[in-house]
């Protein structure tokens, strides 16, 4: 994963976590590792790690979880430990919650 700030790409995109589900991530910069497609709707969800696959599956939606790796400031790197917050709890996708209220 190559971290970046390009909003046209998903995998590797840097953003911030703003949710309550993972308090240890709140306010931290994270990088997107994968999309767990429809994970909030179905138990058997797709695990997507390629931007083309994500686009073919309809892009990131309000029903997805996003696997993220937090930035470790003192070590100057992203963690190898990941979490799977809701897409709408990431700054990059918070607008999805507003569209789907």
Image (spheres, rainbow, N blue to C red):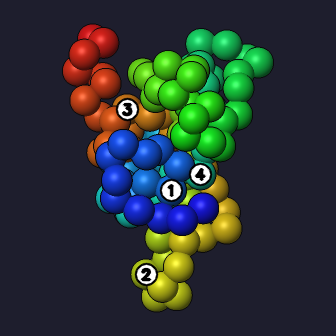
Are the two marked residues, 4 and 1, in contact with CB atoms closer than 8 angstroms? no
Q: Which mark is residue 73?
A: 2
The residue indicated by pointer 1 is 12
The residue indicated by pointer 4 is 33
Secondary structure, mark 4, is: strand
Tell me: 43 left or right of 5. Answer: right
Foreground mark, 4 or 3, reads 4
Which residue sits at x=65%, y=43%?
Answer: 49
In this view, the residue in front, 24 or 64, is: 64
Percent across and percent down for residue 77 are: 53, 79
| Vertical comparison of 72 with 90: above or below | below
Which mark sits nearer the N-terminus, 2 or 1? 1
Foreground mark, 2 or 1, reads 1
Which mark sits nearer the N-terminus, 2 or 4? 4
Secondary structure, mark 1, is: loop
Secondary structure, mark 3, is: helix
Are the two marked residues, 3 and 1, in contact with CB atoms closer than 8 angstroms? no
The residue indicated by pointer 3 is 88
* Quadrant of res 29: bottom left
Which mark sits nearer the N-terminus, 3 or 1? 1
**Measured Cα–Cα span from mark 3 to mark 2:** 24 Å
**Measured Cα–Cα span from mark 2 to mark 4:** 18 Å
């Amino acid at each position: 994963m190559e971290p970046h700030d390009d909003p046209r790409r998903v995998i590797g995109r840097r953003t911030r976590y703003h949710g309550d589900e993972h308090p240890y991530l709140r306010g931290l910069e994270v990088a997107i590792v994968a999309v767990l497609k429809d994970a909030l709707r179905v138990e058997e969800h797709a695990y997507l790690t390629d931007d083309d696959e994500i686009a073919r599956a309809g892009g990131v939606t309000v029903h997805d979880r996003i696997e993220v790796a937090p930035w470790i400031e003192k070590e100057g790197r992203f963690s190898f430990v990941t979490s799977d917050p809701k897409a709408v709890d990431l700054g990059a996708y918070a607008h999805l919650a507003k569209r789907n209220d």
